[in-house]
Image (spheres, rainbow, N blue to C red):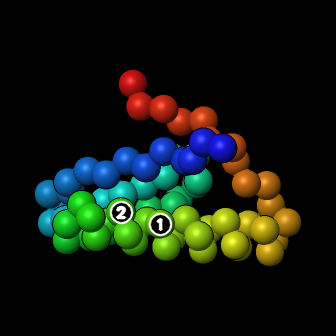
Amino acid sequence: MKDHHINIFWSAEDGGYIADIPDLEACSAFGATAEEALREVEIAKAAWIETARAEGRPIPQPRYRPA
């Protein structure tokens, strides 16, 4: 099974790295380093999926692919 794509980018405005999962609405995280942002977004992803399941909402299949 394919996994959801994760974007990681530097945010000068926030002074750190942002990681987001485009297929999962509003699923993102912040970190002082890219590695920390990745760890945090994996935690956010697990919580997002757990919440969706608990509420009976569908979990989107991975679709997003960077250009």
Q: Residue furthest top?
A: 67
Q: Residue 55 — which label?
A: none
* Quarter of image, res 63: top right
The total number of labels drawn is 2
Residue plotted at (70% across, 73% down): 51
Residue 20 visible? The answer is yes
The C terminus, quarter of image? top left
Where 59 falls versus 31 (above or below)?
above
Residue plotted at (60% across, 42% down): 2
Tell me if 29 is positioned left or right of 10 in this view: right
Q: Are marks 1 and 2 in contact (CB under 8 Å)?
A: yes
Mark 2 Cα-neighbour bin, 10 Å: few <14, some 14–19, many ≥20: many
* Quarter of image, res 47: bottom right
Q: Regarding mark 2 in the picture, which secondary structure is present there?
A: helix
Tell me if 49 is positioned left or right of 25 in this view: right
Callout 2 amino acid: Leu
Residue plotted at (80% across, 75% down): 54
In this figure, which residue is indicated by the disc labeled 1? 42
Q: Residue 38 — which label?
A: 2
Tell me if 35 is positioned left or right of 54 in this view: left
Q: Position of residue 8 (x, y in %)?
A: 31, 51
Which residue occupies the foreground of this view, 27 or 61? 61
Residue 29 visible? The answer is no
Q: Regarding mark 1 in the picture, which secondary structure is present there?
A: helix
Mark 1 Cα-neighbour bin, 10 Å: few <14, some 14–19, many ≥20: some
| Cα distance between the residues tagged 1 and 2 | 6 Å
Where 54 falls versus 45 (above or below)?
below
Residue plotted at (24% across, 60% down): 34
The N terminus, quarter of image? top right
Callout 1 amino acid: Glu
Where 1 falls versus 49 (above or below)?
above
